[in-house]
Amino acid sequence: MTPKEQSRLRVLNSLAEEHMTLDQAAELMGITSRHARRILATYRQHGASALAHGHRGRRPVNTTPEALIADVAHLARTGYAGVKHTHLAELLAEREGIHIGRTTLRRVLLDAGLSSPRRRRPPKHRVRRQRMPGREC
């Protein structure tokens, strides 16, 4: 349990034992009394597990599938070795039919240990003019 859930559990236990009112419990938890009433009802029905979010442990819906990640990493190592990330995303869409965003592709390849082969130029420092000849004193 997270620290927030643990503190809510302590407040709900003292509320259930009638050591405080619903409004005091809501104030301690930083929520409205109506929401505190809802949390208390689910706590009485399901116990401490009701305080955790229902989607905890699930993978997000928009997650890139593991099979696609493995295919892209394999193709980047073998057939498309030495290709920059943006160009690789375009080639995969055009030739392989794999539509993956450039930033997603970059994250996948960096996680697989494949950095972009792009060579960065050294910064161009300003070129100073020749000094004017001075007068002799």
Image (tube, rainbow, N blue to C red):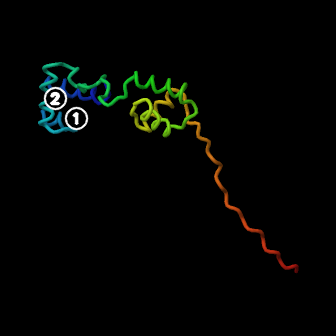
Q: Seen in the image, is 36 located left or right of residue 78?
A: left
Query: Which quadrant would residue 34 be assigned to in this image?
Result: top left
**Disc assigned to residue 116:** none
Dot 1 corresponds to which residue? 29
Question: Do the residues bearing badges 2 and 1 touch, measured as CB atoms within 8 Å?
Answer: yes
* Front-most of residues 7 and 71: 71
Within-10-Å neighbours for mark 1: few <14, some 14–19, many 20+: some
Which sits earlier in the primary sequence, circle 2 or circle 1?
Answer: 1
Within-10-Å neighbours for mark 2: few <14, some 14–19, many 20+: some
Q: Seen in the image, is 109 located left or right of residue 30?
A: right
User: x and y percent of residue 121 in the render?
Assistant: 63, 47
Dot 2 corresponds to which residue? 39
Amino acid at the residue labelled 2: Ile
Query: Which quadrant would residue 22 be assigned to in this image?
Result: top left
Which residue occupies the extreme front position in the image? 95
Helix, strand or loop for disc 2: helix
User: x and y percent of residue 12 in the render?
Assistant: 18, 26
What's the residue at 30%, 23% (across, down)?
Answer: 58
